[in-house]
Image (spheres, rainbow, N blue to C red):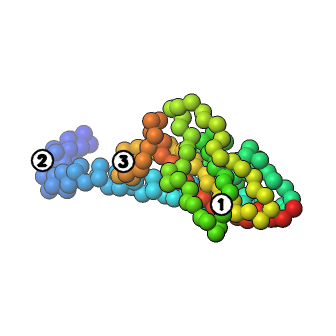
Amino acid sequence: MTHRLKLHMRRFVREESGSVETVAFALWMPMIVLILLTMLEVGAYTARATMLERAMDQTVRSIRLETGAAPQHNAIKDMICERAVILPDCTTNLRLEMVQRDPRGWTALPGSADCTDTALEVAPVRAFVNGQTNELMVLRACAKVTPIFPITFLAPSLQKDNAGDYALLAATSFVQEPR
């Protein structure tokens, strides 16, 4: 029995027919794993961005339907975080900006949104104003998220802050209903 086992082991060690495939596997496997991790990172990024957009839309719909109610910053933030269940540490990493805009004399919001930077001091709420009756309100949210796999192809292409987090932005607008 042991003699046969030794004989098979010697044949296995001397066999060279699979060595080319092994080298190709060793060279290509890291690239395949990196592509797989990038796909997972893109999927997580897309899911988080979609969840933030959906939570913003649902929250704004709720605000519009509650005629006469003017929820404040913390209430709106809590409503968004309740609905965006896959945003990690949402109440800490989400920053809201709500401003009134005149639709006839439109001025765009600044191109870059303020986001919470976990490497810096916490900044106060930026331009959060509850609108009057029939005013156009623009609500913009920015959530900071840490990449799951920072070594992937996606991570270097995202703008990151000092802590290595990237920003998810969502914006929506609504008209403040009459009270």
Q: Amino acid at mark 1?
A: Arg
Name which of mark 2 and mark 1 comes first in the sequence: 2
Look at the numbered discs 2 and 1 and tell me whether their residues touch, using CB distance below 8 Å. no
Residue that extends furthest to the bottom in the rendered view of this protein: 104
* Quarter residue 134 falls in: bottom right
Name which of mark 3 and mark 2 comes first in the sequence: 2
Q: Amino acid at mark 2?
A: Arg
Front-lying residue, 47 or 141: 141
Number of other residues with Cα within 10 Å of mark 3, as a class: few under 14, some 14 to 19, many 20 or more? few
Q: Which residue is mark 2?
A: 14
Look at the numbered discs 3 and 1 and tell me whether their residues touch, using CB distance below 8 Å. no
**Considering only vertical position in the picture, is 163 above or below 113?**
above
Name the residue at 48% across, 46% down. Answer: 166
In the visual, does 114 lie left or right of 25? right
Query: Could you tell me residue 149's position as x and y percent?
Result: 43, 45
Q: Nearer the viewer, mark 2 or mark 1?
A: 1
Name the residue at 66% across, 63% down. Answer: 102
Residue 34 in view in this figure: yes
Tag of residue 156: 3
**Considering only vertical position in the picture, is 165 above or below 41?**
above
Number of other residues with Cα within 10 Å of mark 1, as a class: few under 14, some 14 to 19, many 20 or more? some
Name the residue at 45% across, 56% down. Answer: 42
Q: CA distance from mark 3 to mark 2?
A: 45 Å
* Quarter residue 125 falls in: top right
**Considering only vertical position in the picture, is 120 above or below 154?**
above
Name the residue at 42% across, 47% down. Answer: 159
Query: Could you tell me residue 175's position as x and y percent?
Result: 73, 65
In the visual, does 67 lie left or right of 10? right
For label 1, the SS is: strand
Tag of residue 101: 1
Name which of mark 3 and mark 1 comes first in the sequence: 1
For label 3, the SS is: helix
